Image (spheres, helix red, strand yellow):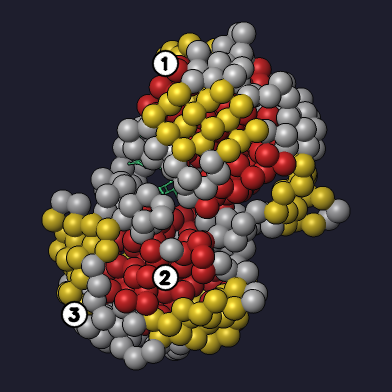
Amino acid sequence: MDRFRIRGGRPLSGTITIGGAKNAALPLMAAGLLTDDRLVLTNVPRLADIVTMRALLMQHGIAVEPTDNNAASLSIGGAITNTEAPYDIVRKMRASILVLGPLVARTGEARVSLPGGCAIGARPVDLHLKGLEQMGAAISLDGGYITATAPHGLTGATIVFPFPSVGATENLLMAAALANGQTILANAAREPEITDLADCLVAMGARITGIGSDRLTIEGVKSLHGATHPIIADRIETGSYACAAAITGGTLHLKGGRLDHLGAVARTLREAGVEMTAEADGLTVKRLNGLHGIDFITEPYPGFPTDMQAQLMALMCVADGASMITENIFEDRFGHHAELNRMGANIKVHGASAIVRGKPGGLQGAPVMASDLRASFGLILAGLVATGETTVNRVYHLDRGYESAEQKLSAVGANIERVS
Ligand code: UD1
């Protein structure tokens, strides 16, 4: 199993190129099930999760190939020959559930393994299933699988989410594109990745209004056609490298990154003493003087994203003063705090809140263990500023969502290497 060895203390400086958004690419690939025509996605990141989604689509009978020898561009197309998403693939990646809506909408049936809990919480899929039921699908659970059938097609419905779930909004948006009649998704999630999916569906012939808002109206159409769609830049990768500039006291130009998608992350970092400047081709992040402790709460977009909580927690460990971090999205997403404490941090968790008593220069290198994808980047950040050597174990979590992280960091001056 690979691990990272990091020797901290170097301010980072230079340019990092931000890749396509993993969380946009996964639903966009699932959207390839909505037509037999070719859907070409460009700016696709090279990540373990993309490989998993490719394997899932291929076993549904869909061809997923790089175009013109360009690995960052995928062509997805072909007829669905199998409507089952097996446990062996779904257990590797919860986002596999995103094939459910497209499969039922397109073929009238789907059998998808029920995703289990994960390291950050129980993560049920009840909102996905209730929405499909409201659209006329018959749903049953048996042997660990969800079976959904709608032999005469799905029917438009008004679905009011009790909570704006990203995945449920995406699944039902894709299903509604091919349903009979009008669907309204109210209190829908409105992350930039959902807007990207909606834009691609429109390019494929879907009729959607309210894009970017929490109320999407979809007039179902009989069929969708192929399209070419560039995937938006990854705002979590952008935010993560912004934290790398901030924690090391350096300056990074994040090429391709979008300051307008960072929203609450940019506000929080600025409050902590970090300068963020939009540029024609991305943004520049620079730490001005010291970092100050700040409080923040994770919320659905445009609030502060849960996927940036671990990285900001690492930053707060070396800020001057205390910070209170409240995790509102997942019930068990502070796994990294115990590892940060092993590096000398002073973090106490009380239910959904963590108090970080920051101390500039307060982290020392240690062997630590990544518990999930974003936690692993939080630990790398801590390693970049700690005195001495840090080893981050279980970097397979990181490989699910950060392309060539160690190469990108070494190129801007970090002392980091992958050890097999
Ligand atoms: C997506 C992102 C993930 C991010 C999360 C929140 C992808 C592939 N993953 O995950 O990186 O951390 O959004 O921004 O885009 N919930 C239910 N019932 C449901 C669905 C969700 O109770 O049917 C709960 C979840 O347990 C969680 C909350 O709603 O507590 C948010 O989950 P959701 O927005 O659905 O996250 P994902 O789509 O799984």
Q: Looking at the image, is 135 positioned above or below residue 310?
A: above
Q: Residue furthest right?
A: 68
Of residues 131 and 96, the one nearer the viewer is: 131
User: What mark, if any, has residue 141 been given in the picture?
Assistant: 1
Q: Residue type at mark 3: give it.
A: Gly
Q: Secondary structure at mark 1?
A: strand
Ligand 1, what quadrant?
Answer: top left
Q: Quadrant of residue 219?
A: top right
Name the residue: 30% across, 46% down: 330
Which is closer to the viewer, label 1 or label 2? Answer: 2
What residue would you read off at disc 2?
266
What residue would you read off at disc 3?
321
Q: CA separation, marks 3 and 2?
A: 20 Å
Q: Looking at the image, is 254 positioned above or below residue 228?
A: below
State yes or no: discs 3 and 2 in contact (Cβ < 8 Å). Answer: no
Q: CA separation, marks 1 and 2?
A: 42 Å
Q: Looking at the image, is 180 positioned above or below residue 33?
A: above
Which is closer to the viewer, label 3 or label 1? Answer: 3
- Residue 388 visible in image: yes
Q: Residue type at mark 1: give it.
A: Leu
Q: Quadrant of residue 144?
A: top left
Going from the N terminus, do you reach mark 3 or mark 1 first? 1
